[in-house]
Amino acid sequence: MTIGTGTKLGQYEVQDFIGQGAMGLVYRAYHLQLERTGAVKVLQAIAPDPDTTARFRHEAQAIAQLRHPNILNVYDFGEYQGTPYMIVEYVPGGSLANKLSDGVLDQPAALKYLRGIASGLDYAHEHGIVHRDVKPANVLLEKDNTPVLADFGLAKLLQGSSLKSMTGVTTGTPAYMAPEQVAGSKVGPAADRYSLATIAYEMLTGVIPFDGEGLLELLYAQVHREPLPPSERNSSLPPKVDAVIMRGLAKDPAARWQTATEFVDALAAALTHSAPAPTVARTMVMAPAVASTMPLAHAAPPVAAPTYVDTEDSGATAAVAFASPPPSIVKRKSRRGAIALGVAVVLILLFAIGTVGYFGYIATHQALTFSLSPSTIVAGDTVVVTAKHLPANQTGEIRLHSELVRFPFRADRSGAVTGEILIPFDSGAGDHLVELCWAARCHISAILHVLDSGAATSPTPGESPSTTPGATPAPGSSPSPRPGTSPTPRATPIPAASPTPNPTPAPAIGISNYNIKILTGSETVSGIHFSPGTAVTINFIQGATTNQQVGKPTVNSSGGFSTTFTVPSTATLGQATIRVCGTTGCLYATVNVNATG
């Protein structure tokens, strides 16, 4: 539902539409008596049943208890035509996500933002509230750049019956979600601190820890893989910073920092102590050659040869006197022998350099390899893509034809790429071209055979039901099938995080691009844990004028889907929302429409 301009909600009058958040539409409103502007958040796209309404009221009551300069204030809440709303503080300065879109932040600014966020989180945790969706888009900025935590729409009280509801609820943004959230396990304050460490990583390196991953690969990585240390993304960062942030990103919640402020304090110390000390602190002053000596504090009795030890924490200049050396007797030697020796050394060096260069070239210019496993599948399956000998840390995309679907990737330090891609359920039977592309061109390709779903029930005559001998299954994939079973292994993107059974994870979505080029840009939306066989409706929403359905894929038997659309012609420059609605409700993702993509 929408609310028209001039509508009265309590003592507030709706003025105009602002945008769309994780749980509903947002309007600007004005309180005439108090002369105060507020933001009205209206529950949207979820049936206003008693459970949903109770959740919304519970959220409002929980946040209304909080009074902190780094947490968005709640002014009022109620219902309009059976739909609940909440009126919160209006912050006009944009979000931290806008700041990060410009690249790496300078360290003082990053620490200022992190300290504010940490202070708000620690305060909320002390009051029994977990945010569960800490990300740059949920950090609003005041005019003086003070960070304000917003959208506690996924928060739950840690007391009473709310504790039970926190187990098995997978909510949040995948790029910033803690491993326990992905696995559907019990979530506590440590999950927010993991998200904060992720933001710190992004601030100092310009990228998130698992950059360039598809949705399934990203969720798998959050649980099972370690990200590259920050210093490998930004060489100016020292190992001390790596240690602080990697502890914040520990898979085990108990191994992370105990409070958000403790994490930021440790990070600030690592950044400060890593700066080069002033030159004077590293200077040794050589006194003239005289007979006297200058004592160092209360030193031991003089010895024949005083020793100077330069320690890392030394902050003073040490002046040490050295006895005058005896005059040396210089003997003239023939220069002919020295010249011959120099020529020999140069020749040896040139030979060594040439040899190393030759073998170095051979070692670093190996043929690019690209493979798909399995290479024969049915639509809706996942395929493990493996490539080697790319440039180190190269970013690019995997392109699936005939209907173009793009999957971003990033090679590791050795130039290798390994990951899963989800083949859209609506991919037609036949041969599909898969290309590996970067630097404005595609370098290698492979053919993917997509079978009709009815043809995958029995092995193809003459085809071996086992995988390639000696091949190692990719993490998360099923073992080789036994004789008599289907030859096509079905990938399991997210293995169980622990041997104890967990409740069924809630649906989650992912998008391929957070920046879309106006008019011509495309977006791939993927989802997991949806109801198999049902239809999912995808809408592109921007302001009050654009609300266009851009896709309606059918969920495959594994609970997943993937579909690509082109940005609607009515879109304008600025922020937009992608809404994905299934049988259990709607999920949202925020994107930016710009001129470059």
Image (cartoon, rainbow, N blue to C red):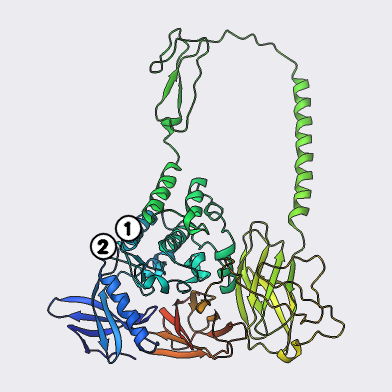
The residue most toward the left is 33
The disc, 2 or 1, on the residue closer to the chain's N-terminal end is 2
Q: In this view, does 391 lie above or below 425?
A: above
Q: Is residue 186 above or below residue 78?
A: above
Observer-nearest residue: 400 or 188? 188
Q: Is residue 596 above or below residue 80?
A: above
Horizontal side of 266 relative to 18 (left or right) equals: right
x then y, percent, for residue 238: 50, 46
Q: Which numbered tag is attached to residue 371? A: none
x then y, percent, for residue 46: 40, 87
Q: How far apart are marks 2 and 1 (CA)?
A: 9 Å
Observer-nearest residue: 395 or 265? 265
Horizontal side of 405 relative to 52 (left or right) equals: right
State the residue at coordinates (74%, 20%).
335
SS class, disc 1:
helix
Q: Quadrant of residue 482 in the image?
A: bottom right
Residue bearing the label numbered 1: 119
Residue bearing the label numbered 2: 69
SS class, disc 2:
loop
- Neighbours of disc 2 within 10 Å: few (<14), some (14-19), many (20+): some
Q: Is residue 92 visible?
A: no
Q: Is residue 380 visible?
A: yes
x then y, percent, for residue 295: 40, 14
Q: In the rendered view of the protein, which quadrant contains the N terminus?
A: bottom left
Q: Quadrant of residue 392 in the image?
A: bottom right
Mark 2 and mark 1 in contact? Answer it, CB < 8 Å.
yes
Q: Name the kind of residue labelled 2 in the image.
A: Pro
Q: Name the kind of residue labelled 1 in the image.
A: Ser
State the residue at coordinates (45%, 16%).
287
